[in-house]
Amino acid sequence: MNTDSTDLDRLHAAVRREKADLEPGREPAPLWVMFLFMIIAIVAGGQLGPMTGGWSFSVSNPFSLARHGDPRPGGGAGAGATDPFQTAMKKGSSGYAVCGGCHQGSGTGIPGQYPPLAGSEWVNGGTERLIRVVQHGLVGQVTVAGQNYNFPGGMQPFGAAMSAGDLANVLTYIRNTWGNEGTMITKEMVEKVRKDESARAKQWTQAELESFASANVPGEIPAGPGATVAAEAAPAK
Ligand code: HEC
C-alpha cells in the first residue's frame, strides 16, 4: 500500500513537470546554437573594424586631442598626428621594411650590390623617375652617387605588390630620411604614373629614365613640412 502511494506521488510529480507540447519549429534553440552565434558575432566584429576604411578609436573618439588640437602649450603629444606629412612618414617607415632587406635600414645599401638611397640623386631628384623605378623596377648598370651597380636581374617592380598609397608613403619616407630632403609624394602622383605607364611590363633601364631625372609628377602636395621642402633644395647631381 505504502509503496503504491509513493509510486503515485512520483508519477504525479513527473506529470506536473511536463510542459505542453510546443508547436514544431517553436522549440527553444539548443545551447550550442547560442554559442555559435556568439562566436560569429565576435569574429565578425573583429573583421568589421579593419574593414571600415581605417576606422580607429583615436579618429572617432570625440575627445581625441589629435582631432581638436591639444590646448597645452606646444600642442602636447597629439600635435601633428593628423599632419599628412607626419602620417606619411610614419606609415612609410613601416612600409620601408619591404625595401630595407636590400637597401638596409640605414639607407646605405650594400657596396657592389644594392645602391644606397641615402644621398641618392634618384631618390632626391625628380619624382617622376623615382616613382617609375619603384613601380616597374630597374635593370642593367646604374650609377648612384658616383658608384656603378649592376645587380643580376636588377630590382623587381613593386607596383603590383603595393597600393599607390603605400608606395607614396614609402617614397615620402626615403626622400626625408638619412639626411635626404624632398617633397612629399602623394598617392595621386603614384596613381598618375600608374595610369600613364599601365602598359609597361618591363623593368626600366637607366638610359630610358634619363630624361625624367629631374621631372616632377604634377599634383598637389598637402600644406606642411612635406610641401615646404623646395624641389630645388635637392642635390642636383
Ligand atoms: C631584392 C633587393 C631589393 C629590394 C627589396 C628593393 N630594391 Fe631598390 N634596388 C635594388 C637594386 C639591385 C637596384 C639597382 C638596380 C640595377 O642594378 O639595375 C635598386 C635600385 C633602386 C633605386 C634607384 C637607385 C638608388 O639607389 O637610388 C631606388 C630609388 C630604389 N631601388 C628604391 C627601392 C624602394 C623604395 C624599395 C622598396 C619598395 C626597394 N628599392 C626595394 C634592390 C632592391
Image: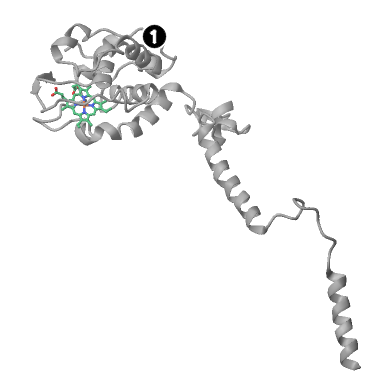
Helix, strand or loop at disc 1? loop
Q: What residue sits 22% from the left and 36% below the top?
A: 101
**Does residue 17 appear to the left or right of 71 in the view shown?**
right
- Residue 105 visible: no
Residue 168 in the image: x percent, y percent?
A: 35, 21
Mark 1 closeness class: few <14, some 14–19, many ≥20 residues within 10 Å: few
Task: Name the quadrant containing residue 104.
Answer: top left
Compared to residue 110, the image places residue 187 above or below, namely: above
Pick the front one: 79 or 142: 142
Task: Name the quadrant containing residue 195.
Answer: top left
The amino acid at mark 1 is: Gly
Pick the front one: 80 or 198: 198
Compared to residue 106, the image places residue 176 above or below, namely: above
Residue 177 in the image: x percent, y percent?
A: 29, 27
Is the residue indicated by label 1 positioned so its CB lies within 8 Å of ligand 1?
no
- Which quadrant does the C terminus fall into? top left
| Residue receiving disc 1 | 219
Compared to residue 39, the image places residue 175 above or below, namely: above
Residue 210 in the image: x percent, y percent?
A: 17, 9
Q: What residue sits 39% from the left and 30% below the top?
A: 91
- Residue 75 visible: yes
**Does residue 203 appear to the left or right of 47 in the view shown?**
left
Ligand 1 located in image quadrant: top left
Residue 226 in the image: x percent, y percent?
A: 38, 18
Pick the front one: 162 or 13: 13
- Which quadrant does the N terminus fall into? bottom right
**Residue most extreme to the bottom:** 1
Q: How is the image coloured?
A: one colour
Q: What residue sits 51% from the left and 31% below the top?
A: 54
State how many labels appear.
1
